[in-house]
Image: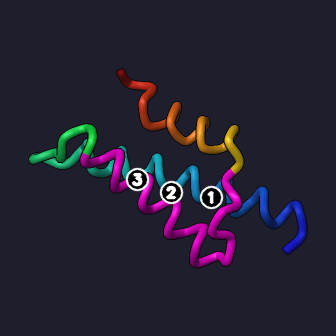
Amino acid sequence: MDESTKHVAIATALYLARAEYRCLQSQPHAAGDEVARKAAFNVAFTFMRRAGMESEFSYHEQEELKSLLYEDD
């Protein structure tokens, strides 16, 4: 997989994680913050695994994912 494809996959995983988190938080009976964050992390890592990039998140990207999911705190 070339570098640009990896960047697109990582950006997509981050986007999907944030979308999952916001979706869970917008439900009438919203899950708690930690439950929603765990679900969002699972979405991102599942997407990466299915894309064949199991351990492709760099430290910086993991921190970016955390900041996306904890920015409301």
Mark 2 sits on what residue? 16
What type is the residue that disc 1 sits on?
Thr
In the rendered view, tell whether residue 54 sits above or below residue 19. below
Residue in view at x 65 percent, y 76 percent: 51
Q: Is residue 53 left or right of residue 45?
A: right
**What crowding class fits label 3: few (fewer than 14 Cα within 10 Å), some (14-19), or many (20 or more)?**
many
**What crowding class fits label 1: few (fewer than 14 Cα within 10 Å), some (14-19), or many (20 or more)?**
some
Q: Quadrant of the N terminus?
A: bottom right
Give the tally of numbered discs.
3
The magenta span reads 35-57
What type is the residue that disc 2 sits on?
Leu
Residue 31 placement (x, y as % from top left): 18, 46
Residue in view at x 46 percent, y 46 percent: 18
Q: Quadrant of the C terminus?
A: top left
Earlier sequence position, callout 3 versus callout 1 = 1
Kindly indicate whether the residue at mark 2 contacts the one at mark 3 (C-beta within 8 angstroms). no
Q: Element under label 1?
A: helix
Mark 1 sits on what residue? 12
Kindly indicate whether the residue at mark 2 contacts the one at mark 1 (C-beta within 8 angstroms). yes
What type is the residue that disc 3 sits on?
Ala
